[in-house]
Image (spheres, grey):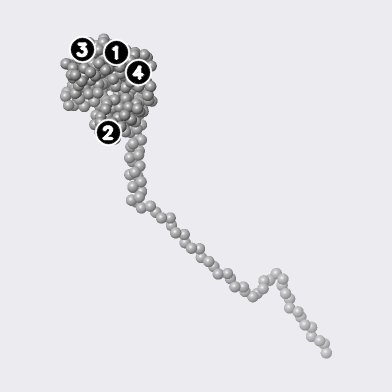
């Protein structure tokens, strides 16, 4: 009897194991949190804070350009002249170049108001320190403001005292020192300085007080006009008081000590 042949099962090497494998659990990604949005209030607040900064920078640029232009353009008026005109009517003032202002008046102004004018950069630090100490002690002295500071104050600002005005004055002084020569600063100063309620500038002052042009002022005349510079509406020189006479004599002595060489340094 023939034996039955056993047929071995065919194994296909290319076929996967038919037994299914368990799949790995699928992890769903967590949704990312959206970035917190700035509220409208915060955005407007930032813009509001930027406005003063932008306006301040614009004002600083405009003022610097205005000061720079006066290096070659004679100012037609000043803040102090406009104020006097509004309060008292027409003012007397006529611009003259510094060559037509007596050297005696140039020297007298430096001797009376700012003896370090040719050397400092717009601020007499020592005089400012003395003024600060005197203020703390309850005293009061004059002479802390340089000629440059007085010039920009008369041109652009008011006589009212405040920290804001002092800050503006300091900025304008720096601009003037940057763009003007010392001689130009003195020329502007002597043409806009107040010598009476409605009298401004050396030429009008010379005609008003002495009946002569500024170019012909004597040393004594120049010293008398310099007496008026810090307080032209309060000080009296016609006739002089005991105080103004003493002030005149002191200025004459200072002029002799300083000498005309100081003008050549400008």
The Cα atoms of the two marked residues, 4 and 1, are separated by 15 Å
Q: Is residue 65 visible?
A: no
Tell me the number on the disc at residue 137: 2
Q: Residue at x 58, y 71 (%)?
A: 23
Depth check, mark 3 against mark 1: the one in front is 1
The Cα atoms of the two marked residues, 3 and 2, are separated by 40 Å
Question: Are the two marked residues, 3 and 1, in contact with CB atoms closer than 8 angstroms?
Answer: no
Depth check, mark 3 against mark 4: the one in front is 3
Mark 1 residue crowding within 10 angstroms, few (<14) / some (14–19) / many (20+):
many
The Cα atoms of the two marked residues, 1 and 2, are separated by 36 Å
Q: Earlier in the sequence, mark 3 or mark 2?
A: 2
- How far from the left and from the top, in percent, is residue 36? 41, 55
Residue that mark 3 sits on: 210
Mark 3 residue crowding within 10 angstroms, few (<14) / some (14–19) / many (20+):
some
Locate the C terminus by quadrant.
Answer: top left
- How far from the left and from the top, in percent, is residue 218? 26, 10
Depth check, mark 3 against mark 2: the one in front is 2
Nearest the eye: 38 or 166: 166
The Cα atoms of the two marked residues, 3 and 1, are separated by 15 Å
Question: Are the two marked residues, 3 and 4, in contact with CB atoms closer than 8 angstroms?
Answer: no
Question: Are the two marked residues, 1 and 2, in contact with CB atoms closer than 8 angstroms?
Answer: no
Residue that mark 4 sits on: 183
Tell me the number on the disc at residue 104: 1
90 displayed left or right of 120:
left
Locate the N terminus by quadrant.
Answer: bottom right
Q: Earlier in the sequence, mark 4 or mark 1?
A: 1
Disc 4 element: helix
Q: Earlier in the sequence, mark 3 or mark 4?
A: 4
Disc 3 element: helix
């Amino acid at each position: 009897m023939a034996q039955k042949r056993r047929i071995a099962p065919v194994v296909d090497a290319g076929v996967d194991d038919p037994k299914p494998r368990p799949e790995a659990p699928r992890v769903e990604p967590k949704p990312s949190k959206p970035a917190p949005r700035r509220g409208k209030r915060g955005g407007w607040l930032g813009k509001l804070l930027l406005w003063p900064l932008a306006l301040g920078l614009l004002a600083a640029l405009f003022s610097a350009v205005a000061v720079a232009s006066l290096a070659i353009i004679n100012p037609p008026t000043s803040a102090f002249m406009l104020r006097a005109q509004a309060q008292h009517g027409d003012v007397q003032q006529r611009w003259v170049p510094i060559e037509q202002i007596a050297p005696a008046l140039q020297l007298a102004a430096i001797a009376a108001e700012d003896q370090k004018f040719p050397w400092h950069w717009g601020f007499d630090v020592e005089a400012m320190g003395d003024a600060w100490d005197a203020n703390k002690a309850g005293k009061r002295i004059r002479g802390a403001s340089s000629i440059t500071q007085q010039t920009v104050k008369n041109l652009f600002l008011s006589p009212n005292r405040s920290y804001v005005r002092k800050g503006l004055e300091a900025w304008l002084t720096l601009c003037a020192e940057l763009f003007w020569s010392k001689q130009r600063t003195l020329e502007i100063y002597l043409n806009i300085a107040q010598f009476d309620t409605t009298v401004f500038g050396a030429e009008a002052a010379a005609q008003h007080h002495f009946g002569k042009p500024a170019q012909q002022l004597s040393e004594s005349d120049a010293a008398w006009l310099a007496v008026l510079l810090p307080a032209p509406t309060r000080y009296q020189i016609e006739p002089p008081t005991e105080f103004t006479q003493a002030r005149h004599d002191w200025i004459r002595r200072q002029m002799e000590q300083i000498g005309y060489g100081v003008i050549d340094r400008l």
